[in-house]
Amino acid sequence: MEDKVKQVAQWIVASKRVIVFSGAGLSTESGIPDFRSPGGVWDRYNPEDFYFQNFLDSEASREKYWQMATEMYEPIRIAQPNQAHLAIAELEKLGKLDCVITQNIDGLHFKAGNSEEKVIQLHGTAIFVSCLGCKKRYDRDEIQERIKAGQKAPRCGDCGGLLKPATISFGQSMPEKETEEAYHRSSLCDLFVVVGSSLVVQPAASMPLVAKRSGAKLVIINRDPTPYDDMADLVVHGQAGPTMRSILDYVKRGMGTED
Ligand code: APR
């Protein structure tokens, strides 16, 4: 394990364009369940029920969606970045981060100190709510107060449109600018580090492929095996927090910037 961590650190120090690609496994050590592990969101809910078309089709589906989203939001609302988030933010400070491409909706990369322009949120964010009609943006806590007060599927105060957390649901169009940017940067990077993702959801999961096919080295840090382990240059089946922390320590040693 130590040799693998040292190797990743050496590649980071030697690289010009490092991308970190994060999934829900990065935030489980911050108390936010992931989706596909035992006890994860899709272990408790049937993802079929939460397709975007269902949300548009019926009040009953919207109420069910908000009930699930409210339960998911609570650990996100109180979560703090863990050592993996903090290590990624420090890579940015060291000038060793091209960008973070994240599937996560929890905003913890920002709480850890990564700058807005360095984080590409492919699946939107749970921190805000948007009106599907007039696109007005609401603070999430304000809408959660309405839910607590008894509204089951809140509507926009301006246009009466449907309100939904600003996340991308299955069957919903991906954010164009972010998706293009993520593909573009994946094709230009020389090191692509996946942290905490099962790599089964498209189009996000095709980014490591784009990077690998463009000549980059691919590193996967994930507790469980992924479909891409065989094509990776290095795989660590371990906890994201301690693994990223020790990688950062070796990067700093390699750059002569130890604390
Ligand atoms: N350290 C390392 N890996 C971890 C940890 C941890 N502390 N905790 C969980 N994992 C791993 C699990 O083994 C799992 O393979 O993280 C992975 C998380 O996979 P998913 O739950 O499938 O999450 P993700 O890959 O982000 O899902 C992609 O699917 O449901 C949609 O929109 C949702 O963005 C999400 C997308």
Image (spheres, rainbow, N blue to C red):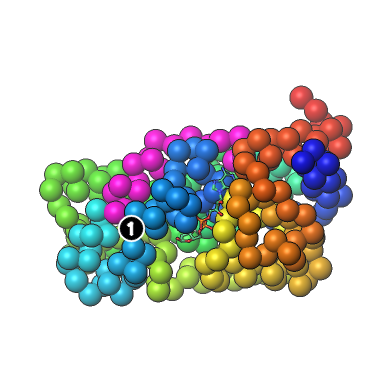
| Relative to 195, residue 210 above or below | below
| Main SS class of the magenta portion in the image | helix
For this orientation, the residue located farthest to the left is 150
Residue 250 in view, yes or no: yes
For this orientation, the residue located farthest to the top is 259
Q: Quadrant of residue 75?
A: top left
Measured from the top left, where is residue 38 in percent x and y? 45, 50
Name the residue: 84% across, 33% down: 253
Residue type indicated by callout 1: Tyr
Name the residue: 66% across, 55% down: 194
Magenta includes 75? yes
**Residue at which label 1 appears:** 45
Residue 117 in view, yes or no: no
Q: Please indicate whether residue 155 sits to the left or right of residue 46 in the image.
A: left
Measured from the top left, where is residue 140 in percent x and y? 32, 48
Name the residue: 20% across, 60% down: 63
Give the residues in magenta.
68-86
Q: Which of the image's four quarters has the N terminus?
A: top right
Q: Which of the image's four quarters has the C terminus?
A: top right
- Is the CB atom of the residue marked by disc 1 within 8 angstroms of ligand 1's nearest atom? no
